[in-house]
Amino acid sequence: MTPQIPDLLVEPIVRMALAEDLGRAGDLTSQACVPEAARLSVSWTARRPGVLSGLSCARLALHALAPEARFETLVHDGDPVDPGQILARAEAPARAVLSAERTGLNLAGRLSGIATLTRAYVEAVAGTGAQITDTRKTTPGLRSLEKYAVRCGGGVNHRFGLDDAILIKDNHVAACGGVRPALERARVVAGHLVKVELEVDSLSQLAEALPLSPDVIMLDNFSLSDLREAVAMTAGRVTLEASGGVDLTTVRAIAETGVQVISVGALTHSSPSLDIGLDAV
Amino acid sequence: MTPQIPDLLVEPIVRMALAEDLGRAGDLTSQACVPEAARLSVSWTARRPGVLSGLSCARLALHALAPEARFETLVHDGDPVDPGQILARAEAPARAVLSAERTGLNLAGRLSGIATLTRAYVEAVAGTGAQITDTRKTTPGLRSLEKYAVRCGGGVNHRFGLDDAILIKDNHVAACGGVRPALERARVVAGHLVKVELEVDSLSQLAEALPLSPDVIMLDNFSLSDLREAVAMTAGRVTLEASGGVDLTTVRAIAETGVQVISVGALTHSSPSLDIGLDAV
Amino acid sequence: MTPQIPDLLVEPIVRMALAEDLGRAGDLTSQACVPEAARLSVSWTARRPGVLSGLSCARLALHALAPEARFETLVHDGDPVDPGQILARAEAPARAVLSAERTGLNLAGRLSGIATLTRAYVEAVAGTGAQITDTRKTTPGLRSLEKYAVRCGGGVNHRFGLDDAILIKDNHVAACGGVRPALERARVVAGHLVKVELEVDSLSQLAEALPLSPDVIMLDNFSLSDLREAVAMTAGRVTLEASGGVDLTTVRAIAETGVQVISVGALTHSSPSLDIGLDAV
Amino acid sequence: MTPQIPDLLVEPIVRMALAEDLGRAGDLTSQACVPEAARLSVSWTARRPGVLSGLSCARLALHALAPEARFETLVHDGDPVDPGQILARAEAPARAVLSAERTGLNLAGRLSGIATLTRAYVEAVAGTGAQITDTRKTTPGLRSLEKYAVRCGGGVNHRFGLDDAILIKDNHVAACGGVRPALERARVVAGHLVKVELEVDSLSQLAEALPLSPDVIMLDNFSLSDLREAVAMTAGRVTLEASGGVDLTTVRAIAETGVQVISVGALTHSSPSLDIGLDAV
Amino acid sequence: MTPQIPDLLVEPIVRMALAEDLGRAGDLTSQACVPEAARLSVSWTARRPGVLSGLSCARLALHALAPEARFETLVHDGDPVDPGQILARAEAPARAVLSAERTGLNLAGRLSGIATLTRAYVEAVAGTGAQITDTRKTTPGLRSLEKYAVRCGGGVNHRFGLDDAILIKDNHVAACGGVRPALERARVVAGHLVKVELEVDSLSQLAEALPLSPDVIMLDNFSLSDLREAVAMTAGRVTLEASGGVDLTTVRAIAETGVQVISVGALTHSSPSLDIGLDAV
Amino acid sequence: MTPQIPDLLVEPIVRMALAEDLGRAGDLTSQACVPEAARLSVSWTARRPGVLSGLSCARLALHALAPEARFETLVHDGDPVDPGQILARAEAPARAVLSAERTGLNLAGRLSGIATLTRAYVEAVAGTGAQITDTRKTTPGLRSLEKYAVRCGGGVNHRFGLDDAILIKDNHVAACGGVRPALERARVVAGHLVKVELEVDSLSQLAEALPLSPDVIMLDNFSLSDLREAVAMTAGRVTLEASGGVDLTTVRAIAETGVQVISVGALTHSSPSLDIGLDAV
């Protein structure tokens, strides 16, 4: 199933970004140098290999300035792209194309960068059964889009905020007086449609937690041998998520321990943008 | 002069980010596991070396949830930080601290990452007289903050949007029918307080542009030898900005050609976050 | 654990409501008839029995117009209240008190009405082990507050929106070509922290669904005998939610069939406001 | 004259409600289970008898997600509807239909519920000449729509906020030092296009007020005999509004006393939603 | 009674104006040239004679940038001011004072300009009993403030928008098929708290309208002799408002015809700002 | 090159203004008196001579209420208009035309008033080579539009805010300890695309400033003879801007001193609206 994000969620962000870029006087250069009647045919092209995400941002930015612009999508979000591959084409008033260019590229480049890095992690664990997931370390205001980009890359989403799942960490356990009371109180608040995850730091904490049956246990900064031991101890009764110290050189070994999910903060907080360019035809 | 950004510009972004994270039910975990009356003393600590930027985001996030919280700043934006160095301390209701934690760290981490990468470029060209500048390749909605982070790192800001300087690129020249008409029309629109920059792709374009006296000429993707030749041809009459193909391995050689400014898109589109942690005291 | 909702989520709604009420000229009557220096001591009093929810709305409305107002909370959200019982007291400029009165009462009355009706359902099923839950039939713009009010009444929350749990209904099954493919595709999209619920209309659909192990099965408009049969068939392997045709005369019998959760749309779409009054002391 | 509310006032509310429901990930279930290309033909049907109001909310919600959707209105706001009667039909992408369904129904159901209850009051006083009016006891953020629904039901609107009419109550009189100074100061502030209403609690207050000629006098919680006496005393010189203790069992008798207007808070604060359903064709 | 406008309505406008002025980089000059710790004592001084309005804008602008600033109001809105008269004093961080200066002056100058011009009209008709009123020809986004300034000048407000009174003009009469049906339909829509005004162009239209008893009749562009005739014909049964061709040279004669209200569009659409300055002490 | 402002910047202002005018009940008069199906053909006509600016506001206001309206532009922004000249024509639902009328006229009248006054100044200095520029004395929320109107009148824009150029005034010099340190610090903050302007009060300050080469020097309240002396001393090395005491009777003499730029606050803070009318055809 192709990932999808409704225009209704994307368009306000695109318009805000355009307004931020146009500032108080609009695009001075286009006003000065481009005749109002001039039209331009352009194409968006990948400059580097990667995975596409957020192409609708380029479309929505152009349509925000020129509702009558023609825009043709050639590649779908989630598809791999090669350097030189044309992603989309448009024909529109030249001023609109040039004024909207950077806004569309900033968003599509950032989201494609996230999708590209996610895909690298997903491919690194191919065949192990492990899933790659994200974190809440996203750009303020762009969480919806960045988590969508993770899905485009083949990852699954961790919780979207503080309100759609419970994740009990050390400070919560301390405030609650132990793992057992923390989980019991979480169950009361959670209701029947909210999952409860517990973070543990050691095998002994895991042993304490297992009989209490949280939906997910996060193994934080476990060594590979401890991860293997944790998988053995758990025997499939609870979903295990490995977290901490994950990069492209370590992720395969972590996946091979048998954990079901691996969370990677770098997907959203440290992925370089994918280089996409706009060329006049 | 220490860089500065008014709280008035930062606070709406922090509140938007908090609302994005709290969602529709608030922080379920803290509601479940942390007593309403519990208080917490915490410190923000750098986990990696870098340059601090955006610490006010952590302060404003905490105060948004607990106006009466005590917050003490120990390091100033723009200062270098070492791993383990304590950046700030706070004492506040535990629920507020834990609910605001991620929002503050996401912003401060991102901005400090930008400042850190900028500082690396600034130090790489130390002594050459060249300045490091940014681009419009920023995160939608965060341009004010990210450009501020560049200043924290020791860089100078390129234009903030399409409206505060004119930058004539190839498509504008083509639409205008040449460099001369483009510059003449730009002068008319620009007024007496707006600078005009012209992008050129070759030494021959530079030769055509120099007699027309734009305020700045951007040398796009010039080889080192062409940059040297451009500096010689210009003889200080116009500010020269090198652009394209700049990374930490090439920037010193570029600076040594004698250009006054070097623009680096990666400062904002591809800088990894600086790892900052929150610890209970 | 007392339910809680952060002021950060409530205050924007209160300010919007105040602005809606003040319109373009402010409170004409207070401007005309109340001296600027006059002060007023008031108390909020329940006129009918019920369960309190949303008292912070009255406090935030008053503080929005008079930051220096003194406000004392005497009853906590979630507590039962009797007619004549004083809920809170305040001393503030008279104009602010009178201008903020209706906004605070509208919100607190509505939320307390929801909490009161929820409590009636909760008490009707006392001892059966069944939980009362809400639906997405909430007032546009007030979902956070209305679901909070359900918690104040002792209910648990169903999903907060289309994005924090999957609920497969007949149209989805039809579009997907059957219950099995629908559940399989849901599992792929859901990730490890999102629950999947399936709505069934008959015992035969239930029999088809049970081996596929959704997290929750909604029994839509089942007769009491079918509910009993469903509980027996399920034998605790999946959480069962009864839905449809629930009112205060039927809910006890439904609970006694053994279902774990009963959802009641009327909690939010048809609860009368609780009558709360503001009296000058 | 059919009541009307411009889309410009309704659309922002519909879009806010959609965004509230879609949250940060959009409609997970439709993304998982409904193919992007699938289309759906649906009809909106009344499940109970009532009066329609707010059908444009369903239309605007669908068009917000699918601008190209076809939507056909079959019944007009203000019309009575029977159980099973089809109100509108649409043909659109299935995902858009299913994602927009609840938002449209929540608004149309609530507004139709208000119109239905208003119509019941209007019919209860038929032939007496009394008008039914609303109060400011509306849902925060929805006052425009809810007062429109009252008009759909055949009622007239009381003031829309604190700023479009003056309503002097006991606290204002007390702050002003009497009914006479209160009315005099109100006249000064009011200008020539703002009406002044005075609330009185007794026949003696009415006697004091009549020579001062407010535009309207509100008789608060008067007995039927006092209402009759008030009508006789006033002899048509001032519009009389009865308020307090009004329900469907008492309103006819109140109307027969000869008061011109009867205000009913329950119209907006306690009306149950009208049950409207969406069915695939 | 001193006019008043709640900070709740003013502050969002002040903050929007500050954000507009600070743009994306803040106040570059203050950042460059004013030490962060520097403080400044300043006073606001009238440079020309006039009537003060909107001084709270200066206070709110300063407090938005420096919540701890000390601000002392010396003159009240509605008071006449002389050149050189000190209106307020403040002591605050120098950067905040200088960054907020223009926003506060722009608003206070504009509003005081309106109050000053209004006062000139009010004084020109002194003793005639005529009131000066405004129109809807206000600055978009500032209607609340500009109508408040009219009150500060001693005028009364005409309607605040299209929704708080009915004003039937020639196009409405034409669409309705005559004055009588237009007034009858207006009465149905208006309810008991909305006034109905009718615009007439001639004495014959006035004669047609008088028996229909609108609350107010606007005499549009009547000659002085026709105004006198209109007053005589009306004999006090309906409030008469003169409109059109009103300036400071004609307003006295118009008032002396006996009309009760004179509307002046220039109060808000063409009043020059009052010159107010900020001086360092 | 015709001035231009993108609809993206204008439309939010137009919609905000419409919402301000429609209030909470919409246009009562049109609802009452104009049949829903009635259509109207209208034209916008200049009532006075002037320069057009902001005609798109009328178009966008109409389209906001009636997307299908036909609107034909007959005169372009920046063109001179004569009394009686038709500026645009439209055909649309009558209710939409009448409800949108005032919003469009308020904006177009204000902007055309600014353009008209600017043109008067521009023509007054014709042939001298001096340019007319504006200030930051604009209407809060409308700076983009009002500065656009100045361009329509033939003026050039001064800085748009505190952030796109540096303007060092007396308070900044005092805080910095002199003109030299102020300019040096400004250069550091400014970067290569931001101009630095210095305000001087006397010839001796000018003499001190000239060797420091700011981009622009503002001569504040200089006499004509001092302006002439300043031009002679500067000899073209720096752009000179005259400021203060400029009106239509003095501007020609100021221009003839040889200054390049003359700033006029009255363009935006005190220009009367141009009278434009809407007539049914």
Image: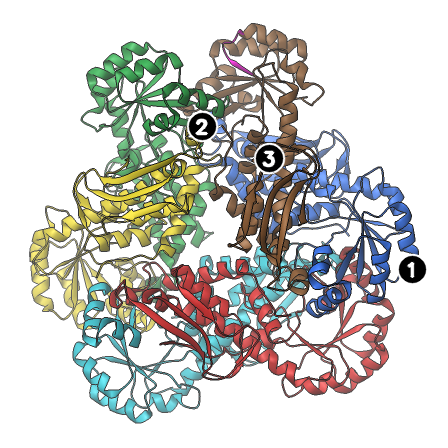
Chain colours: A green, B yellow, C brown, D blue, E red, F cyan
Q: Secondary structure at mark 3?
A: loop
* F11 over C220 or under it: above or below: below
Which of the chains bears the disc numbered 1? D
Q: Amino acid at mark 1?
A: Ala
Q: Crowding at label 3, few (<14), some or many (≥20) Cα neighbours within 10 Å?
A: many
Cα separation, mark 3 vs mark 1, equals: 46 Å
Closer to viewer: mark 2 or mark 3? 2
Residue F267 on the magenta segment: no
Q: Amino acid at mark 3?
A: Thr
Q: Which residue is mark 1?
A: D235
Work out which residue is located at the far front of the displayed protein and give it: C281
- Which residue range is magenta in the image? C235-240
Q: Main secondary structure of the magenta part?
A: loop
Instruction: Tell me residue D210's x, y (percent).
Output: 85, 63
In contact (CB < 8 Å): disc 2 and disc 3? no
Residue at (47, 39) in percent of width and height: C6
Q: Which residue is mark 3?
A: C138
Instruction: Tell me residue A27's x, y (percent).
Output: 36, 61
Same chain under badges 2 and 3? The reply is: no
Tell me the number on the disc at residue B32.
2
Q: Crowding at label 1, few (<14), some or many (≥20) Cα neighbours within 10 Å?
A: few
Q: Is residue F160 visible?
A: no
Instruction: Tell me residue D271's x, y (percent).
Output: 71, 37
**Residue A84 in which image quadrant:** top left
Residue at (67, 8) in percent of width and height: C225
Horizontally, residue E33 falls left or right of residue D21, namely left
Cα separation, mark 2 vs mark 1, equals: 64 Å
Q: Nearer the viewer, residue C15 or B163?
A: C15
Instruction: Tell me residue D104's x, y (percent).
Output: 61, 37
